[in-house]
Image (tube, helix red, strand yellow):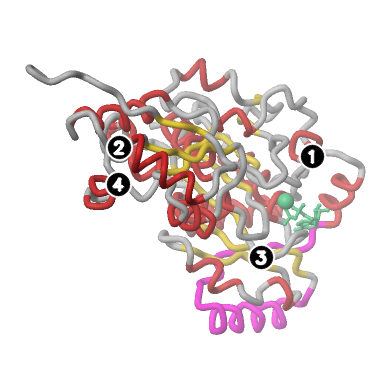
Amino acid sequence: MPGHTRSFTLALFLDTWNEATVRRVKEQLGLSVLYCTIDTITRERYAELCQAGYDDVVPYPPAPDYVRHWERKADEDQGRVTLESLVSRPRKSSYTDFRETKPFEHLSIAPRRAKVICVTGVKGGVGKTTLSALMASALMVKGRRVVLAELDPNGNLAGLFRTDRTVTADRFETLPDALTDPELEQNMMRTAGGWWLIPKGERPLGLSRDGAERLIHLTGQYADYVVLDTHASQLISTVVALQEADVVLGVTTPDRTTWTDLRPFLQQGERPAYLILNRVRERPRRAADIVAFLEREIGYRVVGVVREDDGMYKRVQQGLAPMGSRKTNAEIQRILRAVSVLDTSTKSK
Ligand SMILES: Nc1ncnc2c1ncn2[C@@H]1O[C@H](COP(=O)(O)OP(=O)(O)O)[C@@H](O)[C@H]1O
Ligand SMILES: [Mg+2]
């Protein structure tokens, strides 16, 4: 800018300052203060930090482009970011929301090619992982690219499929926002079935919001199908999966504890959600009653009834990858067609 001395606002990354210090740094030094974290951040914690004066919360290490955003703002504001300018300027609600505008424009214009399926539920042991794996296999038709991402920090997909965990979901915390196909493939494990697995990483609470969004975004551009196997709680990665998926499949069993609170849980998502009743041992009449009850009480359509598959159960007990019986696999195919994920053609587009 002519006649104007270019000066930058420094972005600071720290997490132990108290509110008074944060405000002093901002007001007296005119600096932007970003809270930098390697942990999972809930919406509540995010609001708390903003309340405490931080301008935004960013995952560590922060994306340089994003940091530059704060520097550029300083330039436009004649080299100083005052508290007033920060307050009066419409705030970006998060690092992620910011990506919808500059300088991450490519993110919003690059179309997603994949159908993203979120497999979820409110209880462990209902078969989320098993059904996710069966779906990945069912979707693996020659010429198609299928990715199964394990967002459950307690999962064991790498063990089941005997892939090592040299690359894990944790990588998506720090990967760039754009990757070529071969680059992305270096961050996934190829299973014997031909589909790609992204095993869970070491983070005890799973991926951060940003990490989960990046994973979905990158795989969504690469693959034809992305299956997200989630944890049965409100981890931030579960919430992101619920919000980002094209279709949500909530898994329950005939055990009533697996469907209490399922409705508000699924309502967090924005896309169509359906139910799968899994591990059914009941006779067909009784199973139909449960289906009717679920549809009435939970308010979502039951698109599949998967019966207890003893052969598959035995395999898994022996540490082998889940492989369904013909009947089980037929039901999985039916479910995928019912939610318009699988079309009847078998050739790649
Ligand atoms: N339809 C089924 N028939 C037989 N066993 C099943 C079925 N679905 C899941 N299981 C078994 O139930 C157990 C828990 O399944 P899992 O997929 O790990 O649940 P989640 O991911 O919801 O915690 C595993 O031992 C799995 O083999
Ligand atoms: Mg699981």
**Mark 1, mark 2: which one is toward the viewer?**
2
C-alpha gap between disc 1 and disc 4:
56 Å
- Picture quadrant of residue 146: top right
Name the amino acid, label 3.
Val
C-alpha gap between disc 4 and disc 2:
30 Å
Q: Secondary structure at mark 4?
A: helix
Identify the residue at image location x=25%, y=33%.
80
Q: Check the image and report above or below for 303 versus 151.
A: below
Name the amino acid, label 2.
Ser
Mark 4 CB near ligand 2 (8 Å cut): no
**Mark 1, mark 3: which one is toward the viewer?**
3
Identify the residue at image location x=44%, y=18%.
180
Please report whichever mark, 4 or 3, sits nearer to the chain's N-terminal start: 4
Q: Which residue is mark 2?
A: 108
Q: Are marks 4 and 3 in contact (CB under 8 Å)?
A: no
Q: Position of residue 210 (x, y in %)?
A: 49, 40
Identify the residue at image location x=36%, y=50%.
93
Q: Position of residue 256 (x, y in %)?
A: 72, 78
